[in-house]
Image (cartoon, rainbow, N blue to C red):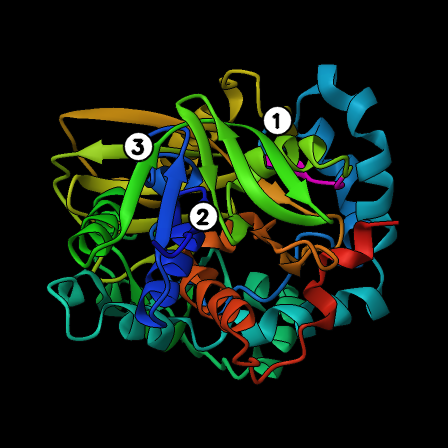
Amino acid sequence: MQKPIVVIGAGMVGVSTAIWLQRAGQRVILMDRGKPGMGASYGNAGLIAQWAVVPVNTPSLWKDTPKYLINPNSPLFLKWTHLPKMLPWIAKFMSNANAADAQRMVDNLIPILTDAVDQHKSLVRDTPLEHWITNSKFSYAYPTHADFKHDAYSWDMKRHAGFTPTVLTGKDVQDAEPILGPATGCLAVLEGQGHITNPAQYITEVVAHFTAQGGEFLEAEVQDFTKSNGRITQIETAIGPIECTHAVITAGIWSKDLMRKLGLSIPLETERGYHVIYKNPSQMPDDPMMIAKGKFAVNPMDMGLRCAGTVELGDHHAGPSKQPIKLLKRYAAEVFPALEYSETEEWMGFRPSTPNSTPLIGEIGDTGIFTGFGHQHVGLTAGPKTGRILAQMITGDAPNIDLTPYAPARYLR
């Protein structure tokens, strides 16, 4: 029997990789330490955020960070106990917060993000999964038009990527989104976007489709890798060894631990993200939106109204903090003053972040081991495109983009 390609990590990137490899005629085993889609893919904002080309570490971060860290109402948090371990990563992260490197990061994100809605539709085309991709607008909600203008750098980068908003002010704001109260005086609206109404269920059903087409899913934790003459031959797991021709590591923040098993130290740290779900809400927005003041997204979902966002730098082994949830609830009450609901549900997950906001996509040397992680907060968005690229690389069908910026070799020194 043909030896399989093993994809490690069953989030959006992993299952997309498995699907595209399967369609290329490969035997594929998809593996995860838990159930499919239960990591960062489970609790994200559900946005197909093809407009999210602006990294966190823009030039303004130098002056903004001190204010953020001392302001309890800011969307940036830090687990201070983890600070000593994070200092090398933070130094590299901050070194990229300049005009030239920020532009480079934007240009790196554009090829893997800006056609994301089409990429998701392509992944599920002619399958029972097509209904999961919802066409929508996407709006940035600002307190005032002056606040929108103050965000000029971000919008210049979005326009550079092909996204130009329609700007609404005054009563047009509430006409467009009645759920918004008087605290929102400006909406910057992007047409032609898309979202997912239940990311965890979406990924669960994509995995089910993969297995129905002959793929195999295993719930197992990777313990080690075996190579022969420098190339991967076997993956050691808690349920026994699995022979393979290639391995693809798409395990999000847990990829950092797997890379250590290969003797590699990758500067990957955790942007801990949070969400609050308002169940049985009395109102829902017509389309998803970003609350600019609190830097969190709002999405009408199957299970209620999800508010998701904030950035907390910290350890992926530590439990949740209280302040980010309090912040989300405070700002939600401010922008949705008439919202009533039966209860809330809170969640925290781990976004895998590189110092230059660019994921690792490619082969590690000539080992047959490929990487597909480090997408920060755009893993759901970029998953289908990343999976297609990895499948093309493995099968020898060269992708039509320059993959140099994403190559893991940049960290293998």
Q: Amino acid at mark 3?
A: Lys
Position of residue 193 in the picture relative to residue 55 (left or right)? left
Whichever of labels 2 and 3 marks the residue nearer the N terminus, that label is 2
Q: Amino acid at mark 1?
A: Pro
Which residue is labeled 3 in the image? 35
Which residue is labeled 1 in the image? 72
- The residue carrying pointer 1 sits among few (fewer than 14), some (14 to 19) or many (20 or more) residues within 10 Å by Cα, namely some
Q: What span is in magenta? A: 266-271
| Residue 48 can be seen, yes or no | yes
Q: Amino acid at mark 2?
A: Val
Whichever of labels 2 and 1 marks the residue nearer the N terminus, that label is 2
> Residue 406 location in percent, x, y?
68, 64
> Residue 110 location in percent, x, y?
59, 74
- The residue carrying pointer 2 sits among few (fewer than 14), some (14 to 19) or many (20 or more) residues within 10 Å by Cα, namely many
Whichever of labels 3 and 1 marks the residue nearer the N terminus, that label is 3
Q: CA distance from mark 3 to mark 1?
A: 35 Å
Establish if 239 lies above or below 53. above
Establish if 191 lies above or below 224. below
Query: Residue at image x 25%, y 49%?
Result: 207
The quarter in which the N terminus is drawn is bottom left
- The residue closer to the viewer here, 365 or 318, is 365
- The residue carrying pointer 3 sits among few (fewer than 14), some (14 to 19) or many (20 or more) residues within 10 Å by Cα, namely some
